[in-house]
Amino acid sequence: MNPKTQHALWQGPAGDIEVSIDHPSDTAVGLAVIAHPHPLFGGTKDNKVVQTLARAFLQLGHIAVRFNFRGVGKSAGQHDHGQGEASDMAWLVEQAHRELLDPSLAKQPVALAGFSFGAFVTSHVATRLREQLPLGKMVLVGTAASRFEVAPVPEDTLVIHGEVDDTVPLQSVLDWARPQDLPVMVMPGVEHFFHGKLPQLKAMVVRYYPS
């Protein structure tokens, strides 16, 4: 994402996990871990929406961690329909919290974010980790509610969706959000991959998620 991006292989539950880490220019104030879209449809940690989310958290002073799910890039294993992916992400969040954050930030809430399939996985990871780690506001973009059983999320979660998303219809996200009384931020005229609207997406996250 930038010349200073660190690339590494971390040994996870199913073998290597390919990780990219970006540090803010000033002293970090927190940690953000971002999950990518569906691996079987070209999703990787270098997806433009995922990179945009990482840039937003960098601007907010967070260390931004992106990673490849099982079977993507240099990550070991095979696609596991969200179950193994959630295990990997939960492990990665805990590992990053231990290894990347200054001990003085140990109680600082960790930000979780995901795009599409990654939003589905992130919702379940948050449920898993809520008792183990301090978690901050989540950011879910293009949440794949029409394709997967997305877990309920806290009321302060930022849910962003495109009005004309033809991969995940807006109605499916509203149907998922309604029983939770969860607001959904709808970007007019925007489709699933936010073509031409990535700067606006970044600005929305920065405004919503104060450092």
Image (cartoon, rainbow, N blue to C red):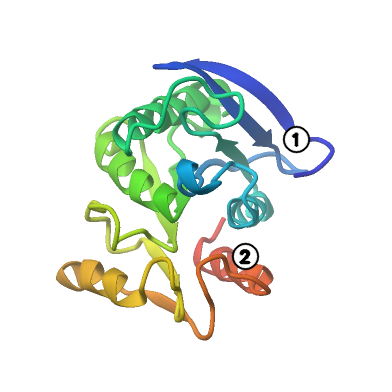
Q: Nearer the viewer, residue 1 or 189?
A: 189
The amino acid marked with disc number 2 is Lys
Q: Which residue is mark 1?
A: 5
Q: Which mark is residue 202?
A: 2
Q: Decide if residue 182 is in sight here.
A: no
Q: Nearer the viewer, residue 196 or 62?
A: 196
The amino acid marked with disc number 1 is Thr
Query: For the point 45% across and 74% down, which residue is it?
Result: 165
Query: For the point 26% across and 53% down, which residue is it?
Result: 150
Residue 100 in the image, given as x and y percentages of width and height:
59, 26
Q: Nearer the viewer, residue 75 or 53?
A: 75
Decide: few, some or many residues near mark 2? Use Cα within 10 Å; few <14, some 14-19, many ≥20.
some
Report helix, strand or loop for mark 1: loop
Residue 146 in the image, given as x and y percentages of width and height:
29, 63
| Quadrant location of the N terminus in the rendered image | top right
**99 in relation to 121, above or below:** above
The reply, left or right, for residue 53 in relation to residue 109 is right
The reply, left or right, for residue 64 in relation to residue 154 is right
Residue 182 in the image, given as x and y percentages of width and height:
27, 70
Query: For the point 46% across and 80% down, which residue is it?
Result: 164
